[in-house]
Image (cartoon, helix red, strand yellow):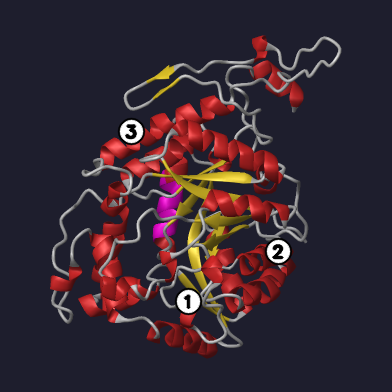
Amino acid sequence: MRASRQLRLGAFMRPVGIHTAWWRYPGAYPDANFNLQHLIRFAQKLEQGRFDAWFMADHLAVLNMPMAALKRSATVTSFDPLTLLPVLAMCTEHLGLIATASTTFEPPYVIARRFASLDHISGGRAGWNLVTTSNPDAALNFGLTEHMEHGERYRRAREFFDVVTGLWDSFAEDAFVRDVEEGIYFDPDRMHVLDHKGEFLSVRGPLNIARPIQGWPVIVQAGASDAGRQLAAETAEVVFAAGGPIEAGRAFYADVKGRAAKIGRNPDHIKILPGAFTIIGSSLDEAKEKRAKLDSLVSYESGIAALSIAVGQDARKFDPDGPLPEIPETNQSKSGRERVVALAKRENLTVRQIAGRLGGYGGLAMMGTPKMIADQMQEWLETGASDGFNVMFPYLPGGLDDFVDLVVPELQRRGIFRTEYEGKTLRENLGLSRPENRFFAATAKAAE
């Protein structure tokens, strides 16, 4: 029996793992980040498991931590998301393909063109994870010596969204007549010149590509600060939320959907997907043993570097065996700092313990048998804490295979996860409507 509420499942591929030691786990593929054949195999396995999407995070700096930690990081080399995902599009038929692209450094015309291209190449399966980049080391790679202030980054991101979506709407659905007899390729009356001039951006347009198959690629957002939540309420269709206690999940869920409702959006048109780190065993004890083994492979250097990034200052100067000192706000990620401070207070952790947690993964973890993990996911779904999850695998390929082969069938038996894809596009599979063309709305309606 199919339940009324259905789980949405993304796979968080960073590009393949968030735990620092994933590549060291026995049986893992150490080169999975940068091995195309492995990545194709993972994408096809996710499609076998009827996952909604491959979610590819990105980073724009290498020298963002001390060398003692950096030399242990598998993310030093990874493919550009918008180079890799078109390849995966050719090797899959239904899996959504979500790429991260920053509004802080890249031009909106380039972003609009690349995602429109991915949507056409994939047959309507593209998604854009709209982020503001908080890493000051990334700024140095784009010719900037000073990083943009937090609030300014989000104002730019809001304007950036308007420009990119406006560029996607450059042509009406019926603009390309391709009249061979008359020699008319497109109708100029069905083309709109954006001519945007704003606080941060000046873009003439139009975009030199037809409107995306989905109208717009699905808009994803991951900010958890107040500014990030407001941006999500105004623009996002999928929100990659930080995992944590279920009570915090319910509060975040209600807050973002409540903000959306206040500005006239349908809250059901925003899917909240917290990250869920899943470790599967034949028993809870076996799953805990796997987690302990994985965590034992994390060095203190990696953990203290992760803590430094989260709090925006050098955590090596903290007393390792003392409590986390007062952490003032910085120009970096506010939500990351707040999560660490809350974790330290909630569990009364020392700096060393926090570093160990962050060096591995310090967010929402689901451990146990497939039934136990399904129980937790169902509780989050049915108590207003999430619409699904961005699943994080502890190591590859084993963690992914276990989830698809063991947890997915359990979710399907309960009627809370699909057995077949609902449609061909990412929007159809997520239950999202196709946006109207703001400049040619009547035509867009007719085309649908």
Q: Position of residue 36 (x, y in %)?
A: 61, 64
Q: Check the image and report above or below for 326 versus 175.
A: below
| Vertical position of residue 351 compared to residue 151: above or below | below
Percent x, y of residue 347: 28, 74
- For residue 304, above or below residue 329: below
Q: Which residue is mark 2?
A: 44
Is residue 364 part of the magenta span, yes or no?
Answer: no
Q: Amino acid at mark 2?
A: Gln
Is residue 357 found left or right of 430 in the rendered image?
Answer: left
Res. 155 mark? 3
Name the residue furthest right. 181
Q: Secondary structure at mark 3?
A: helix
C-alpha span from label 3 to label 1:
36 Å
| Sequence-first tag of 1 and 2 | 1
**Contact (CB < 8 A) between labels 3 and 1?**
no
Circle nearer the N terminus (2, 3): 2
Which residue occupies 70% across, 64% down?
Answer: 44
Amino acid at the residue labelled 3:
Arg
What are the residue bounds of the magenta stretch? Answer: 248-255
According to the picture, the residue beneath numbered tag 1 turns out to be 22
